[in-house]
Image (cartoon, rainbow, N blue to C red):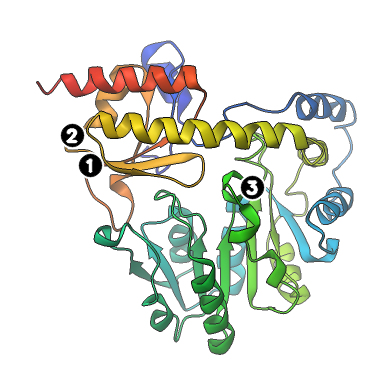
Amino acid sequence: MALIHGGDIEGFVREYGRKPLDFSANCNPLGIPEGVAEAIARAARSADAYPDPLCRALREALGASLSLPPEYILCGNGAADIIFRLAADLKPRRAVVTAPTFAEYALALKTAGCEVIHHPLRPETGFEVEEDILAALSGADVAFICNPNNPTGKTVRPRLMDEILRACDAHGTLLVVDECFNGFLDDPAAHSLKNRLKDSPNLLILDAFTKLYGMAGVRLGYCLSSNAALLEKLRAAGQPWAVSSLAQAAGIAALKETQYVQRARALIREERAYLIGALKEAGMTAPYGEANYIFFKSHVTDLAARMRREGVLIRDCGNYVGLGAGYYRVAVRTREENEAMIKALHRALAESV
């Protein structure tokens, strides 16, 4: 079975009998917070009861953390759950999706029979979203913008993001902004549209606990919108108990981990700079990232396979629409892990000598 994402640790273990150094999935390198793990363990004692289908306590905690009304929040089984609900229930006829970007947008839309227009991001401009996307929005029922983008690590200029939102309002286009990696930016607030929710019923923001809190296995995401009718449609489109009681308890506990988030941001800031420099020295082309992952190009088109033989998983981005062989993404991890990855990279590159 072909997988379109990274993080397939089990596949590596079954092949090699040991765990890899995983740079293919870009989650918080500090791992799950201790307070979250303890909350999950406590919640397990009452797991004989059904979870709250409306996630009331979690939504109240999120609302307090984000300074938003709980009524603006819908929780799901990861952000991907909400993406698929949106496609299945709204059944948009035409959607604009940048290329490259997170594969689940197009996958969910095509599953619902939607025509997906892949708006190309050009390598000669560093894969930035530019003003030409504004014209592409005309006639679209929905548009997806990943900010910062996955896998390129680029943010959209705030002024252009405002123009995109205004264009979507003018065209009656639902703008879905994926901010799942926003928490790793140096200035998250400067690149978020959360403060525009109240006056923009055509805006839906995706976020998750997956990345920032190292909770990929917990499966907990959410969306934000001031459009009550839209949120009700999305809620009704999914199963009644999409978020387990353990995940709800984990989310409430995670929101209290403010020092953990501060430590993670400081670590990412320092190690991101280290990795960009080390990748440049290793001969990688244009390594870049504003969040917790670095995107780059190599002349070695089988680099992921070589790194795998070295015990390191990296993300081969050749299957992203708009990319091809030779593009890769690596997570930003701890200094010890980053140094080990770079050493493995040099060994992998030496195979071609």
Percent of width and height locating residue 141: 52, 80
Assess whether mark 1 and mark 3 are in contact (beta carbons under 8 angstroms).
Answer: no
The amino acid pointed to by label 2 is Val
Give SS at disc 1: loop
* Residue, far bottom: 170
Q: Which residue is mark 2?
A: 300
The amino acid pointed to by label 3 is Gly
Query: Which tag, 2 or 3, sits closer to the chain's start?
Result: 3
Percent of width and height locating residue 239: 72, 54
Percent of width and height locating residue 207: 64, 53
Give SS at disc 2: loop
Foreground: 347 or 49? 347
Mark whose residue sits in front, 3 or 1: 1
**Could you give the CA–CA distance between mark 2 and mark 3, rounded to whole angstroms?**
34 Å
Give SS at disc 3: loop
Q: Residue at x 69, y 36 (%)?
A: 262
- Quick check: 229 left or right of 69? left
Foreground: 303 or 11? 303
Q: Residue at x 37, y 31 (%)?
A: 314
**Could you give the CA–CA distance between mark 1 and mark 2, rounded to whole angstroms?**
6 Å
Query: Which tag, 3 or 1, sits closer to the chain's start?
Result: 3
Q: Which residue is mark 3?
A: 78
Residue 340's quadrant in the figure? top left
**Could you give the CA–CA distance between mark 3 and mark 1, rounded to whole angstroms?**
30 Å
- Quick check: 132 left or right of 18? left
